[in-house]
Image (tube, grey):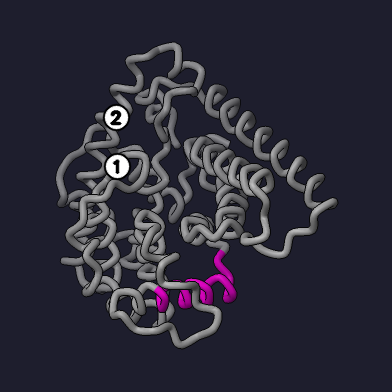
């Protein structure tokens, strides 16, 4: 990220590094406590975690997610380890958001993609009132109640090259009531219908699909810009990196990165320009997503 964009956020590189290190230290403390407890009580799966173990793993996952977004403000390469580890921890907690973060980091493996297929089959089975035909598919009720997790699952599945994941995503995108839903998702409270629309267009391959995504991302960026401007009004919280906002929005940046991987950098840059102007503050998460696909020589290590 360039100096001028940090200036738009009224932050210094040192403030950003300090915030990242703080959250990484919190994560390591939680993981150390988790390991100490687990040595006495072996863990074989998320369903066997006791309340303290679950809380410690969740705290570590959340702290690493926070650290990753601060690191992303400096450079994509420095954010990737935290993104990947946070994704693995959320995944171990049974949260599809983990696959979203791992996909951002480029660390999804074949086992992850198989699991995404199983989760998508469970979602489609729930939507079509069919009984899952695979013993490892989670119960439909587990998928139904986690609406925000469904949003991260379908955009991740739609962005993959897997034919199976894309076929299942098409079925879910057509049948799910979330395609018109208003349930808030992410730190900006974006209506879930926007995630469903992005998922549908990620399944396309034309410029009109890329432009539709660009328009949706622009609307999210405008909300981001307004949120950041308001957050900066509390100078004490902002100076100490304690404002209750996601300064580097991983939803916008992740969806931008997925779109670049689908349509190519040149097309996405063209359609983002066609979608209209954004001020420097509002454009920051778009730039972060583009930087995941194309490292910037002006990034701050």
Instruction: Give how far across and how far down residue 134 sits, in percent.
Output: 50, 85
Is 197 one of the magenta-colored residues?
Answer: no
Quadrant of the image for the N terminus?
top left
Instruction: Give how far across and how far down residue 188 sits, in percent.
Output: 31, 39
Q: Quadrant location of residue 158?
A: bottom left
Above-or-below relation of 175 to 30:
below
Q: Mark 2 or mark 1, which is nearer the start of the sequence?
A: 1
Instruction: Give how far across and how far down residue 156 sits, in percent.
Output: 41, 64
Which residue is label 1 attached to? 189
Of marks 1 and 2, the one in the foreground: 1
* Residue at image location 21% in from the left, 63% down from the top: 179
Residue nearest the viewer, comparing 12 with 66: 66
At numbered mark 1, what does the secondary structure look like: helix, strand or loop? loop
Residue nearest the viewer, comparing 92 with 295: 92
* Residue at image location 21% in from the left, 65% down from the top: 177
The extreme top residue here reads 236
Q: Which residues are magenta?
A: 108-122
Which residue is label 2 attached to? 227
**Residue 4's disc number:** none
The dominant secondary structure in magenta is helix
Inspect this view and state whether residue 78 appears: no
* Residue at image location 26% in from the left, 62% down from the top: 196
Above-or-below relation of 21 to 45:
above
Above-or-below relation of 236 to 67:
above
Q: Quadrant location of residue 236?
A: top left
């Amino acid at each position: 990220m360039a100096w001028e964009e940090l200036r738009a956020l009224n932050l210094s590189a040192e403030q950003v590094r300090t915030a990242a290190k703080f959250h990484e230290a919190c994560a390591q403390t939680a993981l150390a406590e988790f390991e100490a407890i687990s040595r006495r009580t072996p863990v074989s799966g998320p369903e066997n975690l006791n309340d303290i173990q679950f809380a410690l793993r969740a705290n570590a996952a959340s702290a690493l997610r926070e650290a990753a977004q601060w690191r992303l403000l400096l450079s994509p390469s420095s954010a990737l380890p935290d993104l990947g580890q946070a994704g693995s921890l959320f995944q171990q907690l049974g949260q599809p958001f983990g696959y979203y973060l791992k996909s951002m980091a480029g660390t999804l493996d074949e086992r992850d993609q198989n699991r995404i297929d199983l989760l998508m089959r469970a979602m489609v089975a729930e939507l079509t009132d069919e009984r899952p035909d695979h013993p490892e598919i989670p119960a439909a009720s587990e998928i139904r109640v986690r609406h925000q997790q469904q949003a991260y699952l379908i955009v991740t599945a739609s962005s993959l090259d897997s034919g199976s994941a894309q076929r299942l995503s098409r079925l879910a995108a057509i049948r799910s009531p979330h395609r018109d839903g208003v349930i808030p998702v992410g730190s900006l409270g974006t209506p879930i219908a926007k995630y469903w629309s992005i998922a549908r267009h990620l399944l396309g391959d034309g410029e009109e699909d890329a432009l539709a995504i660009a328009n949706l991302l622009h609307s999210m960026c405008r909300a981001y810009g307004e949120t950041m401007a308001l957050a900066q009004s509390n100078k004490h919280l902002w100076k100490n990196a304690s404002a209750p906002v996601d300064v580097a929005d991983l939803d916008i940046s992740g969806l931008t990165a997925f779109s670049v991987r689908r349509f190519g950098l040149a097309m996405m840059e063209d359609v983002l320009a066609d979608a209209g102007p954004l001020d420097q503050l509002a454009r920051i998460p778009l730039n972060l997503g583009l930087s995941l696909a194309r490292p910037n020589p002006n990034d701050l290590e």
